[in-house]
Image: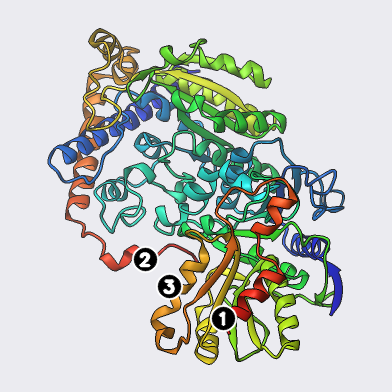
Amino acid sequence: MSVKKDKELAKQFYTVMYRTRRFEEEVFEFYKRGLMPGLAHLYLGEEAIATGACATLREDDYIGSTHRGHGHLVARGADLNRMMAEILGKETGYSKGKGGSMHIMAMDKGILGANGIVGGEIPIATGAAYSAKLRGTDQVTLAFFGDSASNEGTFHESINMAAAWDLPCVYIIENNLFGISVDIRRVTREHQLSKRAEGYGIPGVTIDGNDVFTVYETVRTAVERARKGEGPTLIECLTYRWQGHHVGDPGEYRDPEELAEWKAREPLGVLEGKGLLTEKEITQIKAGVDAEIAEACKFAEESPYPDPSEAYSDLFVD
Amino acid sequence: MRELMVRDAIREALDEEMARDSTVFQMGEDIGVIGGNFKCTVGLRDKYGDLRVKDTPISEQGFVGMGVGAALTGLRPVVELMFADFMMVCGDQLFNQMAKITYMSGGQCSVPMVVRMPLGGGRSSAAQHSQSIHAWAAHIPGVKVVLPSTAGECKGLLKTAIRDNNPVIFFEHKMLYTTKFDDVPDEGEDVCIPFGKARIVTEGSDITVVANSMMTIKAEKAVKKLAQEGIHAELIDLRTIVPLDTETIIRSVKKTGKLLIVDEGHVDFGISGEIAARIMPDVFYDLEAPVQRLGTGNVPLPFSPALEFPLIPDDKSIAAKIREMV
């Protein structure tokens, strides 16, 4: 790849990762101020995965997302105002306040929904891939999920079928090492989850999920393969979440040294270390994103709550 | 009208809808090469190809969820579960995903999907292949629930289900698949039976009997016998329980003053209690006797016919209950 192209991508990646970072920080602030109902599972520290992976997609491709899904939506270019409004339970939100953080959905961006059930989105994403094959398009679906979802039955059932039928789906494990408090290394014998690909007869690879370029290049290869009709790939991205499982979980079950090690090579820092962006460029990107985020927060905070009667709409469509 | 077996009427509906709309496709266990465990899809794989009539591995969560994903992206999946009991195996995809995504998205999307599955006892299939668990489905907001009785109903209601833009769970009774009915519209007639409109099977003035699926057939036999004894029951076949046609039930009960609800689900926390409670504000002062219920005894379905058959209402027990009430 040319240096010029790398610089362009670096700018794009930094913008999206910083946007995700700032979005999540503000979600956390809303929670602390008591303005966010319920809980949210933050993507802080994992920004490189959604950013690098979604950059490989076309407008008409699909993604399946998770309970830790804000980053996937931001990376897909979802409307920040409507996202933040949804997270605050406002009528201007993507789902008019009916979904919230865990079910945030942006069909206009091909996002088949975040999902409150661990592993619940894996078959749905696989079905979108089946649909593309049946309709004869070359659309690709990315299925994001965590390390814990890889121990759900849906993981096995879905990947087995996708492999059997060469479905255009790329399975991305965001391995942040923990399922709430349980370390994946305590509940699996083989810790390298991508090795499971061999059992399905598909390619599997484990990569540094905090290096956005590595994610981008790996997913791009898998997406190209899927688009050509050559079937699915399993990509395990190693990463770490900064917070506990959700905003209300301090995550004290983790080794502080381990957290510090991962924070020392967090996605924005790793990208800065590549020397592709000048300080001035970084400052400019940050200023632009900060303004967008401030606007999203203002929009969400000032938006009205839905009328209680709205609880009965949208159960069925005509 | 033509005479047809239920399984053939179902196949005709699937065939006609697949021919009419290229976005309709089917997935399920054994539906392709052998045409289904109950032979409802015979010949369709040959006609429409492997991708549109897909034999799946035994992965109910996986392929029901794939149906949801396909429905979200422009297709109309018809997914077959080999037995209604397997609903529990894929409950998350049916009830946390399929039923809720439209609502959770604030109406951004729709899930035009049908899940067909056979329910009911009477075949010595024991506790995990005999249940009538339609009340489970009806309890979750966001799915329509269909319980056809006759071949004509199976065909007309299935066509409606496939064209509906919402998730539909379509319960077929496994003991009716090879039963012939003469209520199937002639070839070339495109008849869709609307949801939420019950059928009055026989008119009568002494008592109202509400039933669905196989219980309609058994109740009809009972009601015919009783007519010879001078007891005139009005039999209502619900066809769908979500939506539920309370209007037809209320109108009938106002006329007869008595109501027996027959449903093959377990009586405890089943749909009969729901129907009774739902119409009560409208009929309380018209009732001449307490509303009564008949259903399957509250134990898992046992294997031996000696144990199983007495647990499920039949024409004799229905007739006896009606005699007792009038």
Q: Position of residue A201 (x, y in %)?
A: 68, 20
Q: Chain of mark 1?
A: B
User: What amino acid is at disc 2?
Assistant: Tyr
Instruction: Quickly name the residue at label 3.
Output: B277
* Contact between labelled residues 1 and 3, with CB atoms less than 8 Å apart: no
**Which mark's residue is nearer the viewer, 3 or 2?**
3
In this picture, residue A39 sits left or right of residue A152: left
Residue at 23% over, 20% down: A279
Disc 3 from disc 1: Cα separation: 19 Å
Judged from the image, the secondary structure of the residue bearing numbered disc 2 is helix
In this picture, residue B319 sits left or right of residue A109: right
Say whether residue A194 is visible.
yes
Residue at 75% over, 44% down: B54
Same subunit, tags 2 and 1: no
Q: Chain of mark 2?
A: A
Q: Position of residue B160 (x, y in %)?
A: 65, 69
Judged from the image, the secondary structure of the residue bearing numbered disc 3 is helix
User: What amino acid is at disc 3?
Assistant: Ala
* Contact between labelled residues 2 and 3, with CB atoms less than 8 Å apart: no
Whichever of labels 3 and 1 marks the residue nearer the N terminus, that label is 3
In this picture, residue B304 sits left or right of residue B169: right
Q: Position of residue A58 (x, y in %)?
A: 53, 39
Quarter residue A305 falls in: bottom left
Q: Chain of mark 3?
A: B
Instruction: Quickly name the residue at label 2.
Output: A312
Same subunit, tags 3 and 2: no
| On screen, residue A20 above or below B104 | above
Instruction: Quickly name the residue at label 1.
Output: B325
| On screen, residue B56 above or below B114 | above
User: What amino acid is at disc 1?
Assistant: Met
Quarter residue B278 falls in: bottom left
Say whether residue A139 is visible.
no
